[in-house]
Image (tube, rainbow, N blue to C red):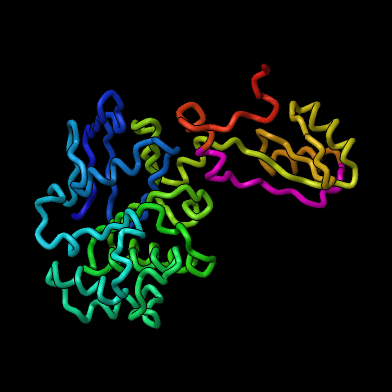
Amino acid sequence: MTTIDVHELTKEYGPTRAVDGLTFGARPCRVTGFLGPNGAGKSTTLRLVLGLDRPTSGTATVGGRPYGELAQPLRHVGALLDATAVHPARTARDHLLALAHSNRIPAARVGEVLEDAGLAAVARRRVRTFSLGMRQRLGIAAALLGDPPVLMLDEPSNGLDPEGIIWLRQLLRRLAGEGRTVLISSHLMNETAMTADHLVVLGRGRLLADTPMDAFLAARARPRVRLRTTEPERLRAALARKGFDAVQKADARLTVDGARAEEIGAIAAHEGLTILELTDEQATLEDAYLSLTAGVTEFATPPAGSAEED
C-alpha cells in the first residue's frame, strides 16, 4: 500500500520549532486536505516529506521509504510546491520533456499530460508568456507525468479561473477514485470542503485534527435552523417557552441556534403556526476550521472595534 506516513516529525530553525512532534498519515483512495493558518508548518512538512529539508527528529516516508531513496521519484510521487519554479525560457513541452528524460518516462507521456492539463494548444509557448493559472496547470501536469500513485499539491488552485478550479476538483476526485493517495494543502475552505474526504489540520507545527471531513464538521459545528413564518412574534414567544432563542434577521427570516428543524417544526405544529420555510443550516468547513484554529493563528486581524487606544 502506498501511503504518506509522518511520525513524530520535528523541524527546528534555530530557536523556532516549525514542526513539533507531528504524526499523521495520508491514505489511498481519498483526498486528504492539509489545513492550517499561515506559519502552521504545512509547507515545511511537505518539504520534509519530499526530502528538501532534513528533519531535526522523526521520520517522513512514502510507501515506507524516505523520498530520497526512491529511484525515478516522479514514478512514485507527483508534487507541486511552487508553480513559478520553471525556467522561463523553456517551452511547456520542453520543460516536461526534460523531467521525463531524467526519470526514464516515455516522451509520449508529455503529450498526454499536456492534453489532460488543457495546455496542448500552448505546448510550444515559452513559460515566461504564461499566466499564473497556466503555470499552475503546467505544475500539475509535471506532477502527473510519471503516473504516480501519490500526489502532493501545495495550493493547487492558486491562480486558476473558475473553469480551472472545476477541472482541478474533478481531477483530484478522479485520481483518488483510481486508488491514489492525494494530499492537498489549501487556504480555500469551500474548495477543500467540496474535494477532500479527510482533513489534517495543523496549528503552530502541532497536529490539531486528523479526521474524516464529516466527523470534523459534526464535532465542531453547532446546529442551526433557518425559518420563515406568517406570525414571527408568536413563534418567537412559543420557542422562548421551550428554551430556544429565535433571532430576527433583516430578510424576515428567523434563525435558532442549537436546534434542529424537526424540533422547531413540532413546536410550530403544536401552536398551529404556518411555516413558510424551515431548513437545517449546513455546517461550513470555514466555521469549523476557524473555531478550531482561533487560538493558534500567528497572524490574525483583531475584531472590529478592538483597536488599542493611544
Q: Quadrant of the N terminus?
A: bottom left
Residue 10, position as x, y percentages in the image? 24, 31
Residue situated in front as seen by the camera: 189 or 181: 189
The count of marks equals 0
Residue at the (52%, 35%) spot, across then down? 220
Q: Please indicate whether residue 94 sits to the left or right of residue 33 in the image.
A: left
Residue 26, position as x, y percentages in the image? 29, 48
Residue situated in front as seen by the camera: 291 or 295: 295
Residue at the (82%, 38%) spot, across then down? 248
In the displayed structure, 237 sits above or below 47; it is above
Residue at the (74%, 26%) spot, across then down? 243
Residue situated in front as seen by the camera: 30 or 110: 110
Residue 111 lies in quadrant: bottom left
Q: Which residues are magenta?
A: 272-289
Residue 235 lies in quadrant: top right
Q: Please indicate whether residue 168 sits to the left or right of residue 279 in the image.
A: left
Direction top: furthest residue: 310
Residue 87, position as x, y percentages in the image? 29, 65
In the displayed structure, 89 sits above or below 18; it is below
Q: Please indicate whether residue 97 sits to the left or right of residue 198 in the image.
A: left
In the displayed structure, 146 sits above or below 93; it is above
Check if residue 281 falls in the magenta segment: yes
In the displayed structure, 15 sits above or below 137; it is above
Q: Please indicate whether residue 297 sits to the left or right of residue 265 in the image.
A: left
Q: Quadrant of the C terminus?
A: top right
Residue at the (87%, 43%) spot, across then down? 272
Check if residue 217 falls in the magenta segment: no
Residue 27, position as x, y percentages in the image? 28, 51
